[in-house]
Amino acid sequence: MRTLILALLLACPLRPAHAGALASSSAWSVTGSAGAYLGESLAGVGDVTGSGYSDVLVGAYGAAGSLGAVYLFPGGPAGLATGASWSLTGTALLGAGLGTVVAAAGDLNHDGYADFVVTSKGPVGTSGAAYLFLGGPSGPSAAPAWSATGAAGSGFAASVVSGAFSNSGYRDLAVASVASGSVALYPGTAGGLSATAAWSITAGANVVVGGGQDINHDGYDDLIVGAPSSGPNGQVWVFLGGPSGLPATPSWVLDGSAVGSLGSQFGSSVAGAGDVNGDGYADLLVGDQSSAGTVRLFLGGLGGPASTPAWTQSGPSAGAGFGVHLAGTGDLNADGYADVYIGANSGFADVFTGGPGGLGSLPAWSASGPGAYGYVGAGAGDINGSGHSDLIVSAYQASGHEGEAYLYLGLPIQASPTATGGGSGPATGSSRVYPSPVRGGTVHVALNLASATDAHLRIYNEAGDLACSVDQPGLAAGPQVLDVDASRFARGAYFYVCTLVSPGGGTQVLPTGKFLVVH
């Protein structure tokens, strides 16, 4: 049996249709062994080792004679490592098909390291298993810190999602059983995940879970349940988190008939989108299995999601399978708004970027390729410390079912600055802002100056009123930071304009930047 080959692909045959939020070519690629189906599951899992960079977990459920395997690739200043820093192969004890699902779990044990979940088909006599691995300075734990298995025929752990659904102070894990149609919640405790579920519901066959984000901005994460077999059209249920955890009945229910998704398994895919329009509420994506595939965005709000979609997008043609996989990606282009990934089962994927009006009507990035390219994709987190999120995408049937995965780096929005004025020469430089969103406190405008200059910063609210001004004379060439106290800014979007004036009188107005304030 050939061992797994983890090779950096220097020439990638994939052709992005266009690029805006992401680089047009992959910065990193990896391929698996024969029949491994590497990349059928992917996840950005956060900083597992405390290096300061996000890491990526890749599953290969067909590796090692279908025992399956998972591989952790660490991030760093140069991007993802070419070889896995940690891997695990399935065994009779863990169950075959290890890596069927991989998912971020956050920091479940509050030790400062990100943790993750891996699933398999389960040991003999079970139907699916989920395993929790804890991060640490030397990498993930060698053995799972927690596990759970499903009853025979249940299809346990076909999808999982982590969130802080109660006031326990710990993150919980929701696990869906695709055959039995149930969802079980394992609460987090000081000792780790509970051995038994504390909450469960039944939503019908092919149930999926998503979310783990705060849709109604009450400080608790919320759970999205896709119930595509509920009724003739399918439904989506949202359970709003609270001090005591998730309620026994859904806080919000939407039937496919309400949005024109008739007989198309509405809710066959769901995902937390993040805050795509900067209003402080997390939003949600819902897909169906209509011929071309349709995805709808529902905006979060104080009372929960809106019942009318704010955005709808369908596949380009019959059979496109648009929306078979959905993911919130974080902020790929560093503009302060969350972006989303939509995969199809016909060999392409799109990224739509957020903005003040929500998601754009056209994809900001699109790519296609062979081997089920784009069927699976996920936000990778900030792999190289650039300050914005990156994207991991796979073609799990590529290269004779070996499978391949690709990393695309996020690109900040920044127009080329132009200098004006006279004097002995114009000032030249560029700027970016962080953090965004900012929850009170200080926001920083980072400058990169080509020469000594005076800086004049003006910050405006959405109405165009001046909110703050900062004048800083005599800045030296190189990196500089202007600090702005945003603690008294009202919630909303703010725009900043920075003018540089050289000692000789030359001026340059840098491109307008933006940041969000949420409380």
Image (cartoon, rainbow, N blue to C red):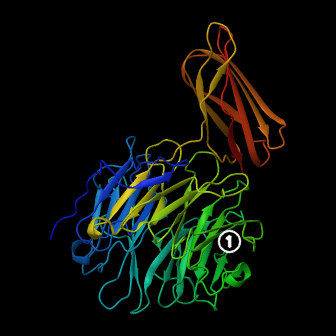
Image spot of residue 239 (x, y percent): 66, 77
Q: Which residue is mark 1?
A: 243
| Residue at image location 38% in from the left, 80% down from the top | 129
Q: Quadrant of residue 15?
A: bottom left
Count the marks: how many? 1
| Residue drawn at x 61%, y 74% as measured from the top left | 224
Q: Would you say 278 lies left or right of 81 here? A: right
Q: Who's the residue at 46% across and 48% down the image?
A: 24
Q: Quadrant of the N terminus?
A: bottom left
Q: Nearer the viewer, residue 297 or 302?
A: 297
Residue 370 versus residue 124 in the image, above or below: above
Q: Is residue 48 visible?
A: no
Is residue 88 left or right of 503 when viewed as pictured? left
- Residue 165 coordinates in the image, percent (x, y): 61, 70
Expressed as whole percent of the image width and height from the top left, the position of residue 494 reads 74, 41
Nearer-the-camera pick, 408 or 115: 408
Q: Is residue 448 above or below residue 259?
A: above
Question: Closer to the camera, 517 or 451?
Answer: 451
Q: Residue furthest front?
A: 317
* Residue type beneath disc 1: Pro
In this rendered view, identify the residue nearer to me: 173 or 359.
359
Residue at (60% x, 31% y) in the render: 431
Q: In which quadrant of the rendered view does residue 287 lie?
A: bottom right
Q: Residues within 10 Å of mark 1 (few under 14, many from 20)?
A: few
Q: Secondary structure at mark 1?
A: loop
Residue 244 in percent (x, y) is at: 66, 75
